[in-house]
Structures are given as C-alpha cells and as structure tokens.
Image: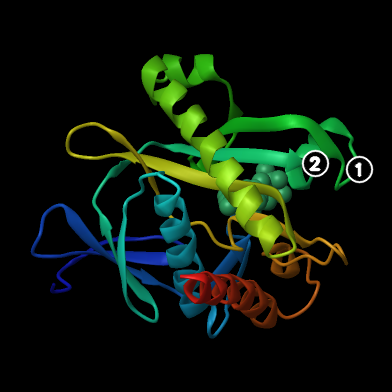
Amino acid sequence: MEKLALQYQGKAKKLYATEDPNVLWVEYLNQATALNGLKKDEIKGKGILNNAITSLIFQELSAAGIASHFIEKISESEQLVQKVTIVPLEVVVRNYAAGSFTKRLGLAEGTKLAQPIVEFYYKNDDLADPLINDDTVLALNLATATEIATIKDAARQVNEVLIALFHHLKIRLIDFKIEFGRDTTGAILLADEISPDTCRLWDETTNEHLDKDIYRRDLGELVPVYQEVLRRLENNQEEKTCIL
Ligand code: UDP
C-alpha cells in the first residue's frame, strides 16, 4: 500500500489517500490541543502512543463483534483505515460525572451515574461543539432516525466492552468520545480513535488520571501516563496469548 496525497489534517492526525479509494493512511501526530485549540503543544512520543493504544482497542472491539473502520497498524505512528464520511457528531458516553457534565449540572466529579448516558455534540469548531439533542440532529439533517438508533446502540455496546476491558486493567472508564462514519454502502461504522486523548480513565485504586486531563489541567507529564495505559493493555494481550 502506498501513501498518496494528504486528504485532511486534523488536530491530532493526518489522513492520506492510498491507491485503494476505500482505504486511508492515518498518521498520528505529536500535537496536543485542549480548550478548543486555545492550548496547543508538541509532545514527543504522543503520536506513537495513541496509535498503539487505539489499534489495540479497536482490535478488542472487533474481537467483541463491534465493526470499525480500523484495518491494521502499519508502523509506530501509522495505521490503515476504511474510508468513511464522518457523521458530524461527537458521541460522548458517560458512566461517571466529569468535565463539562459536572459544570453543567453542578455535580461532583466522579459521581456515579445511575445509568450510562449517550450525548451528541455537533462537530463544529467555530461553535465549540455545542450539545444538541436527537431532534436537532434530525432537523439539521446530520443523521436519520435509523442512524441515530444505530449510533446510540453501538455507543452503548462500545461502552460495555470498554468498561470490562479497562476494569481488567484496574482502570475506571469515566467517559469517552467516539465518532461514526458512513461507508460507501451508507452503513454506519465506528471511526476516528479511542485513546487517552478521547477517554477519561482513572486508576481504580488511586483515582489518578490516566488521560488527557493531565495535559488539560496541567497535572504533570502526559507521556509516562499514556505509557502506563499502553503497558497495561499490552500486559493484557500477553496474558491472553499465554492462555492460548
Ligand atoms: N472529548 C473529546 N474531544 C472533544 C471533547 C471531549 O475526546 O472535543 C472527550 C473527553 O476526553 C472526555 C469526554 O469526551 O473523555 C467528555 O468530555 P466533556 O464533555 O466532559 O468535555 P471536556 O471536559 O473535555 O471539555
């Protein structure tokens, strides 16, 4: 597979075309951003870590029967994915109150929610990704009612698999953001990345933050924390290989 023209440059990734029109070449960057781009830094090693973590997580999801755009990791910082048209929604799933949710509702961070919540934010940097409801998604033609149902169902399934996976790693899954795309047939597919950049992960015993809040809130060095998440995921892989 060959890397061809740059198609899109995001905050954390570059997407290139390949000779296969249905396959994109993704390069994970070292850039970290927060506060809708107001805080921005180059963090050496972050691209490699997020590529490794996302690849392992998408493989776990696939093993659990959840389809995604992920094809394969091809180098330390690169992977191949199926080309999809991204649905302009940031789909956030919450198990515990944190971040914007605590501010909006006056809850203490870490409050356990009686049931998981799926929220939609409209992907629009100029508007700082506002929270919207299903009616708004329909009224703005962002997705159909069937697609909304598929997305919510998939988001809840991803949540179940990730809660169990992270619990095995002694990590509490507080919340996370995922994105979905439409493939050439119009089918909805999980896309983008799942990494400590897009999840809130707390150590089960110490409540230490093992995610991008380290960077957002200036709590310390990001790289050793992401390395710890990868170490636990890799140990889990090794355990499984030993059992086989
Ligand atoms: N999130 C993300 N990208 C965004 C906004 C949020 O990946 O542009 C993730 C974030 O890491 C957290 C979850 O979505 O795991 C919920 O974030 P929240 O709405 O609490 O916003 P924040 O506090 O990050 O502003």
Q: Tags 1 and 2 in contact by the CB under 8 Å rule?
A: yes
Quarter that holds the N terminus: bottom left
Q: Note whether residue 241 is visible.
A: yes
Instruction: Give the residue furthest to the bottom.
Output: 44
Left or right placement of residue 55 versus residue 174 in this view: left
Between disc 1 and disc 2, whose residue precedes? 2
| Residue 176 tag number | none
Q: Nearer the viewer, residue 224 or 138?
A: 224
User: What is the crowding at mark 2: few (fewer than 14 residues within 10 Å), some, or many (at least 20)?
Assistant: many
Instruction: Give the residue furthest to the left.
Output: 19
| Location of residue 235 (image quadrant) | bottom right
Query: Mark 2 sits on what residue?
Result: 97
Left or right placement of residue 18 versus residue 233 in this view: left
Quarter that holds the C terminus: bottom left
User: What is the crowding at mark 1: few (fewer than 14 residues within 10 Å), some, or many (at least 20)?
Assistant: some
Q: Secondary structure at mark 2?
A: loop
Instruction: Give the residue furthest to the front.
Output: 244
| Residue 108 tag number | 1
Q: Secondary structure at mark 1?
A: loop
* Residue at x-position 59% and y-position 62%: 197
Identity, as a three-letter code, of the amino acid under mark 2: Ala
Left or right placement of residue 24 versus residue 52 in this view: left
Q: How is the image coloured?
A: rainbow
* Residue at x-position 51% and y-position 76%: 242
Q: Nearer the viewer, residue 11 or 64?
A: 64
Identity, as a three-letter code, of the amino acid under mark 1: Ala
* Residue at x-position 44% and y-position 14%: 139
* Residue at x-position 40% and y-position 44%: 65
